[in-house]
Image (cartoon, rainbow, N blue to C red):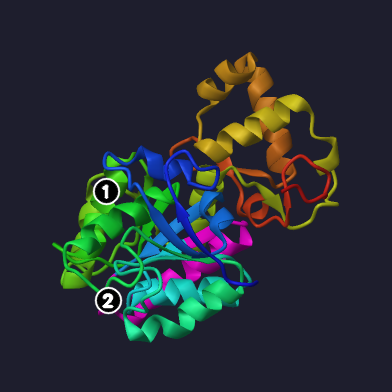
Amino acid sequence: MAEGTFELHPGDALYPETVLELSDVPQTLYVRGNPEVLSTPALSIIGARKASPYGLAVAELAAKVAVEAGVTVVSGGAVGCDQASGWAAVNAGGKHVVVLGTGADVVYPRSSAGLITRTLDTGGAVVSISPWGMGPRKFAFPRRNRVIAALSQALFVSEAGMPSGTFSTAEAAMDLGRDLLAVPGSILSPESRGTNYLIANGACCIIDEESIEMAISRIYGTLRYSRPDAPGIADLDQTQQTVMHALIASPLKVDDIAALVSLDAVGVLKLLGSLELEGLIERMMDGRYAPSKFALHAQTPFGHNGKHVN
C-alpha cells in the first residue's frame, strides 16, 4: 500500500472515536500509512523491554490469535514484547499500528525500522501526537502510552515491572474502562510483578491459548466454527443463538439463562443439553456454562451458515 501522511484533528471523519475518550484529547494525530485502520477493532499488546523468552512468546501468541479473529494489533514499537507482537501480527497477515513517542516520521528506536516498514507495507499505520521531526523526549512517552490504551478496546500485558511504561499504559487502560488481560508469572521475577498485581486487582488472567481466544471472543463478539457444515449448526433457532451470544459475553448459570430467554428451568436445561450435544458449550466447574473450545476455534462467524461476515 502506498504510504501517505496525514494530520487528523477532532471532528475529522478519520479521527478515531476511541481517542476522543481521553481526558486530554490530542488536538492532532500525525499519521503515516493507512488512517482508516485506526478505527478498526483493535487489541493493544505491550510488555517489558527486557522481556523473557516467555514474555516474548506470549506476546507473539496473543498477536496471532488477534489476527485470526480479524482484530488489529496496536503496540508501541519498543524493544521486547512490543516488537514481538508487531512482527507476529504482520507475519500472520494482519494489520499493525505503531504508536511512537517521537514524531511519526522519526524511527525510534532504530531497531524498529524494519517493523515500521513492514507495518506500512501491509496496510497498517504509524501514529504520534508529537509533531513531525521531533526526536525522543521523556515527557512524550506517558502521553504516547495513553494513546496506545485509547486506540483499542482491550489491552494485553505479557510482562510488566512496577513502575514501568508498560504499567502506566495499563493504568491508562483502566482509567478508560478498557478490558485488561494479563499473563501471570513468577513471583520472583521483577518483570512479572506488574502483571501479577494487575491480575490480583481484577485483570483477566490469561493462562493458555484458549483463554486468549475466549477473551477475544467475549470482547470483540467473534464466535467462529472450525466446521461450518457440522450437523445442526445451520439449524440453530433464534433462542439458541441468543444464548450462544450471551455466553460469549460472559459465562452464565442456569437461572441467568432462564431469565434471558424467558424459559423455565426444565426448558433451559433441555436447550443447554442440545447445545452440549452439538459440542458448542461446556459446563464449568462452578456450574456456569461457557462456549466450548470447538465453537471458539471456528472459521466463520456464528449464525451465518458458514458464510464469512465482516
**Would residue 248 appear left or right of 47 to someone viewing this image?**
right
Residue 154 percent location from the top left of the image: 42, 49
Q: Depth check: 175 or 9 in front?
A: 9
- Residue under the image location 42 percent in, 41 percent down: 10
The residues colored magenta run 48-73
**Would residue 61 appear left or right of 233 to someone viewing this image?**
left
Say which element carries label 2.
loop
Residue 60 drawn in magenta: yes
Above or below: residue 38 compared with residue 277: below
* Residue ID for mark 1: 172
Query: Identity of the amino acid at label 1?
Result: Ala
How crowded is the residue under tag 1: few (<14 C-alpha within 10 Å), some, or many (20+)? many
User: Which mark, by number, is residue 214?
Assistant: none
* Residue ID for mark 2: 49
How crowded is the residue under tag 2: few (<14 C-alpha within 10 Å), some, or many (20+)? many
- Residue under the image location 33 percent in, 58 percent down: 129
Query: Identity of the amino acid at label 2?
Result: Arg
Residue 265 drawn in magenta: no
Say which element carries label 1.
helix
Residue 280 percent location from the top left of the image: 68, 45
Quarter assignment of residue 189? bottom left
Q: Depth check: 167 or 250 in front?
A: 167
Quarter assignment of residue 144? bottom left
